[in-house]
Image: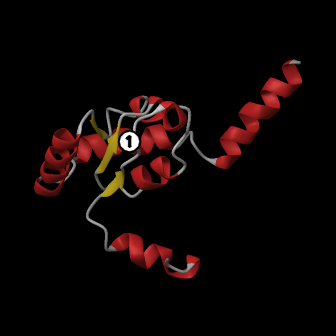
Amino acid sequence: GVPYSRLPEAIATADLFILPFAVNPLTESCTPLKLKEYLATGRPVVSTMNPTVMHWSEHVKVASNHDEFIGHLRTALAAPQPGAELERLRQRLAGETWESKAAEFLSFVNEL
């Protein structure tokens, strides 16, 4: 493992990030917590099928089988993400802060 204090340094060396979950009823009901953190780096993300990941499929290479996963890895390493796509991703992630989630929750509670 990497100590928390060295995480930014470790992330800076990554070429891409993977979410290689087995596809089964348990993992289909999970929300990969690292997904948005990976996306925020601006580096490519390759994942197996997952309902949460599919909401971000514009920015994630999603594979439905082993060969497709390997193909996405190769493609992601060969071509950097275009600038326009990165800007759209950053705009979308801007609403994904803890502060915005807390405000959304508070709004929901106040409506009750």
Q: Is residue 86 above or below residue 7?
A: above
Callout 1, which amino acid? Answer: Leu
Q: Secondary structure at mark 1?
A: helix
Looking at the image, residue 74 sits to the left or right of residue 15; the answer is: left
Residue 60, x across and y down, in percent = 32, 40
Q: Residue furthest top?
A: 112
Looking at the image, residue 17 sits to the left or right of residue 40; the answer is: left
What residue is drawn where x is 56% and y is 32%? 29
Residue 6, x across and y down, in percent = 50, 81
What residue is drawn where x is 57% and y is 76%? 4
Image quarter where the C terminus lies is: top right
Residue 19, x across and y down, in percent = 39, 49
Residue 17, x across and y down, in percent = 34, 57
| Location of residue 48 by image quarter | top left
Question: Which class describes the residues within 10 Å of circle 1: few (<14), some (14-19), or many (20+)?
Answer: some
Looking at the image, residue 37 sits to the left or right of residue 15; the answer is: right
Report the residue marked by disc 1: 89
